[in-house]
Image (spheres, rainbow, N blue to C red):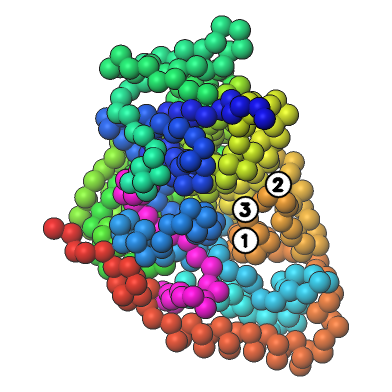
């Protein structure tokens, strides 16, 4: 039997990305690997990734993380979706929830029934047929062993990294403190053989994980993997994060509030609210962004991390030679739909499934990169959708977004829905048909046609079916506790000193 060629795994960088990778590798393959994580306390964690999507729950279950313990330690709250405000028009509000809309058939999706009902004058709002949507709107939440509710979390990025560090170290992951100063490569193959630290320490490895953030110290500065810029489709390139004390009960959703040159997030945790002002520096000065942020926040400021500059796009090779990039090192799609942590977790899951114990195979690398590219491009398209489908012309920024060219893959989706009411979900795609539907309808994209399966029912039958759906959902929501009350009883953290 061939000996194991890849045993020493070195993770360069901590934070959300590094410790997610360490936790996953340590808890699943830890007995087969020697895992070392190198990070510097001076560099710290970018406090943007505080909102997640439902796949985080499956990832935690895979690792054996207990939900209540995790939520107490992270002072986390629940998330049923995102409230989008002022996107298609000033004054608009719509919800992208994590739920299933209505009941579909083999012939077609539920929204074709709804579109037919709307055409007849009695369909109502599409969100009324989604349990999570209506619970979000009412500020309600409950979960349990028998519950089917689909949800994610709001979490504290710094506390999350600390939680995952403790979890990882329980599986033998070794942490080394220090700043990376240089990278040693093999003269013939170009493979990375070691990283050197400011302390003089040298950390050798067989497989290196780059979690060094936008710098990409290994994947880009050492290997030159290349970068594809998506700024023409995702024009925001700056963010001002700030944390404030909560002034009211935590709600089970993230707010994404559009402004004249971008948008602002508001993420409620148990102990504070995460806020962030995202903007295009081509359309707004840093000073105006600072003023805009402080004019919109509520509550006492707890902490104001450094301003963040970013570039939307992807690394041309997520895996190059013996380096695999995760998090900001691999690419970035702005935080509008809270996808950053998901892309880290799905990436390390894929790495575990195809771990190169016997040595790096180029065919394996190519397959990994192809899937990573497809995943992040589908996320890119979904986020770009929010900007393109706007009717706003009140600023240079929104006029640009409304009239910009978009990727052919997204243009085809928009045309398909506009012309036929059809939406779809590709293999390995994060966002379901329900997500595309809620955003496209919310951004005022009205289909010109739809499947006529609704005509197979009489008006009386369709009305009754829709009424029953709405009534059942409304009744279930009415019986739920307020989100804050459930959090307090289920996973409330101790009061801060």
Q: In which quarter of the image is residue 240?
A: top left
The residue that label 1 is drawn on is 435
Residue 213 visible in rendering:
no
Residue 410 numbered tag: 2
- Given the current orientation, which residue lies at the most extreme left position? 497
**Against 469, is 393 above or below?**
above
Looking at the image, residue 444 sits to the left or right of residue 448; the answer is: left
Gap between marks 3 and 1 measured at Cα: 9 Å
Looking at the image, residue 142 sits to the left or right of residue 43; the answer is: right
Q: Disc 2 or 1, which lies upstream in sequence?
A: 2
Percent of width and height locating residue 90: 49, 59
Q: In the rendered structure, which segment of residues is drawn in magenta?
A: 138-165
Gap between marks 2 and 1 measured at Cα: 14 Å
Give the SS element for disc 3: loop
**Against 415, is 20 above or below?**
above
Judge the density around disc 3: few (<14), some (14-19), many (≥20) Cα neighbours within 10 Å. Answer: many
Q: Disc 2 or 3, which lies upstream in sequence?
A: 2
Residue drawn at 58 percent across, 87 percent down: 472
Residue situated in front as seen by the camera: 123 or 475:
475
Judge the density around disc 1: few (<14), some (14-19), many (≥20) Cα neighbours within 10 Å. Answer: many
Give the SS element for disc 1: helix
**Against 307, is 80 above or below?**
below
Residue 430 numbered tag: 3
């Amino acid at each position: 039997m061939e000996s194991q060629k890849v045993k020493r795994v070195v993770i360069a960088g901590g934070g959300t990305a590094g410790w997610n990778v360490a936790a996953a590798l340590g808890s699943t393959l830890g007995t087969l690997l020697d895992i070392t994580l190198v990070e510097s306390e001076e560099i710290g964690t970018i406090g943007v990734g505080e909102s997640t999507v439902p796949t985080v729950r499956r990832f935690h279950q895979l690792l054996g993380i207990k939900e209540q313990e995790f939520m107490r330690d992270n002072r986390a709250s629940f998330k049923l979706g995102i409230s989008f405000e002022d996107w298609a028009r000033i004054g608009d509000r719509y919800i992208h929830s994590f739920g299933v809309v209505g009941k579909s058939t083999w012939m077609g999706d539920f929204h074709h029934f709804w579109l037919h009902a709307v055409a007849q004058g009695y369909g109502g709002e599409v969100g009324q047929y989604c349990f999570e949507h209506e619970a979000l709107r009412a500020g309600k939440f409950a979960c349990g062993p028998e519950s089917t509710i689909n949800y994610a979390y709001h979490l504290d990025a710094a506390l999350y990294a600390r939680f995952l560090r403790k979890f990882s170290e329980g599986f033998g992951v070794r942490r080394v403190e220090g700043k990376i100063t240089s990278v040693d490569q093999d003269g013939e193959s170009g493979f990375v053989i070691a990283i050197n630290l400011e302390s003089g320490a040298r950390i050798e490895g067989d497989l290196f994980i780059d979690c060094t953030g936008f710098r990409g110290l290994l994947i880009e500065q050492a290997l030159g993997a290349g970068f594809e810029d998506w700024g023409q489709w995702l024009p925001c390139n700056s963010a001002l994060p700030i944390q404030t004390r909560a002034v009211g009960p935590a709600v089970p959703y993230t707010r994404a509030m559009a402004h004249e040159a971008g948008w602002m997030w508001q993420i409620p945790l148990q102990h504070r609210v995460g806020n962030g002002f995202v903007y295009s520096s081509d359309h707004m000065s840093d000073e105006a962004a600072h003023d805009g942020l402080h004019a919109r926040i509520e509550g006492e400021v707890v902490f104001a991390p450094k301003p963040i500059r970013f570039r939307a796009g992807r690394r041309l090779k997520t895996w190059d030679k013996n380096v695999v990039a995760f998090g900001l090192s691999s690419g970035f799609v702005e935080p509008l739909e809270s996808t950053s942590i998901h892309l880290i977790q799905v990436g390390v899951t894929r790495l575990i499934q195809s771990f190169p114990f016997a040595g790096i195979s180029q065919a394996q690398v190519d397959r990994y990169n192809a899937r990573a590219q497809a995943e992040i491009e589908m996320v890119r398209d979904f986020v770009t959708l929010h900007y393109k489908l706007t009717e706003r012309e009140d600023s240079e920024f929104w006029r640009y977004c409304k009239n910009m060219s978009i990727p052919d893959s997204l243009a085809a989706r928009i045309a398909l829905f506009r012309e036929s009411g059809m939406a779809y979900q590709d293999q390995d795609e994060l966002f379901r048909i329900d997500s595309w539907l809620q955003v496209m309808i919310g951004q005022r994209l009205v289909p010109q046609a739809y499947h006529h399966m609704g005509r197979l029912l009489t008006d009386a039958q369709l009305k009754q079916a829709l009424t029953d759906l709405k009534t059942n959902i409304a009744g279930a929501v009415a019986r739920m506790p307020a989100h804050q009350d459930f959090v307090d009883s289920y996973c409330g953290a101790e009061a801060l000193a």
